[in-house]
Amino acid sequence: MNAGHASPAELRVLLRMPTARDGAMAVRVLSRAGVAAEACQDAAEMARRLREGAGVLLIAEEVLSDEAFADVKQLLLGQEPWSDLPVLVLARAGIDSLAITDALQELANVTVLERPMRVSSLVSATLSALAARRRQYQLRGTLTGLREADQRKTEFLATLAHELRNPLAPLRTGLELLAKKNRDAEEDWIHALMSRQVNHMVRLIDDLMEVSRITRGKIPLQFAPVALQDVLRHAVELSQPLIEAHAHRLVTDVADKPVVVHGDSVRLTQVFSNLLNNAAKYTPRGGQLGLSLVRDGADACVTVSDSGPGIPQDMLDAVFDMFVQVQDASRAAQGGLGIGLTLVKSLVELHGGTVKAESGSVPSGTHMVVRLPWAGAKASPPPVPTGGEALRARASRQHVLVVDDNQDAADTLAALLHTLGVAATAAYSGDRALQLMEECAPTVALLDIGMPGMDGFALAERIRCNAAWSPVTLVALTGWAQKADRERSAAARFDHHLVKPVDVDRLIEILNALP
């Protein structure tokens, strides 16, 4: 059923009168007016029927004092945001009772009608209440449509990001290969240019994936006590190349005493790096950026400022919406997807904080103020990085089978592994991979999930069903990076899940950990 249309049960009048005779009479009167009405024997029966739906409740004042009416009241108080079920109370003549006073205070949509009353007044009040209820169902349909459209949008973003990852995988791997060749100055310049652009594309795709995951509640956070000084230092390191490329001057004012919050250090670094990148992009060349950290009461307050053109007052809230950009600033920054601040806002709110844009009259620069709950003065030690070269040296003990229907992707990844001293063989289909499992006896198999014919899951099942191949480490290779995708890989008995384009250091870590 369309959510904007109501079922017969959702448009019926549930009524409880002082006597059964009064109830039967009210049903007849409303039926003659074309209104479906059902008399309930008591408040308990009304609660049971209400769970199935109703358009209006029509009750005598005496019902409000029934102990079972508490169940009806709970159902009314627990309605969906779009719903505000009309309740018509037929009151006895005279002074309002305490029960009616309580109902008016506790329930939002109560109309009191004094009895005895004209039949036409009862019918008119009921029809008006039903008309209001129909408008609520229309609102339900509109909200449902918006939710479905938003779900389709986020699914499209995830699919788009996945499809874009596939052609990027061989490009990035090819650049890794070229980085190991001897080159002249001009070739170095071309290689650096291509690396920057590919890395930029990867970041844009990562942002698409992140926004899709956050809006669907699929993003995991690793909470721990984190010193914001460390987070900001890492964020500056990530943003420094962009700041220097625009010849900006970064002025920092960070508290000496540790300011600790309870959060995910990686995600918080992403937040402040995004804000610094935005400030660098939207500020004219040679500008000044600011980064400050103070403790303000119960909050840790981080401000990222710039000397750019500022944000119009009517856009200060809108800039955090997805795909929204200030028109002139967008041209100055040479485009972008308009999702960076959406990502910032979502991540900050997941940490229990707030982010606010402040800007005076244009041009006056912009201040992005992030507030996070302060958690004390002691942080967890930062993770110690592992030496990549040592990992590469020990990974050479493995023989890797790379399986991908994208021949460029398979060949470049196999070639890159060769340059690292790892034996590697490429296959372009599941059938060929099974042949090579017999011929080459690999210790590791990287399987593309989305192959036509025998996909990565089917191939993994064939490998796992062969006892002779049970020691082989299976690594899923895919553009899908959601938690559900990783869970599906694990259920298919993959040992690891890597997202395209492959992080070579992560792959080497996996190889190094094997016996």
Image: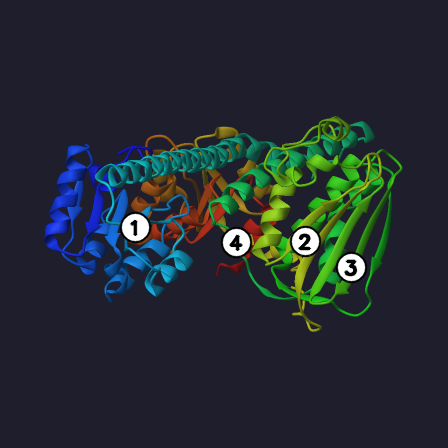
What's the amino acid at mark 3?
Answer: Leu
Q: CA distance from mark 4 to mark 2?
A: 28 Å
**In the rendering, at what x and y percent does residue 373 appear?**
65, 64
**In the rendering, at what x and y percent does residue 179 appear?**
70, 38
Mark earlier in primary sequence (1, 3): 1
106 on left or right of 420: left
Disc 4 and disc 2 in contact, CB within 8 angstroms: no
**In the rendering, at what x and y percent does residue 311 appear?**
75, 36
Vertical arrangement, residue 98 with respect to residue 23, above or below: below
What's the amino acid at mark 4?
Answer: Leu
Front position among marks 4 and 2? 2
Residue at coordinates 37% horizontally, 35% vertically from top-left? Answer: 135
Front position among marks 3 and 4? 3
Residue at coordinates 28% horizontally, 61% vertically from top-left? Answer: 64
- Is residue 420 visible from the viewing direction of this image? no
Q: Dot 4 lies on which element?
A: helix
Please name the residue that numbered disc 4 is placed on: 511
Front position among marks 1 and 3? 1
Please name the residue that numbered disc 3 is placed on: 293
Q: CA distance from mark 3 to mark 4?
A: 41 Å
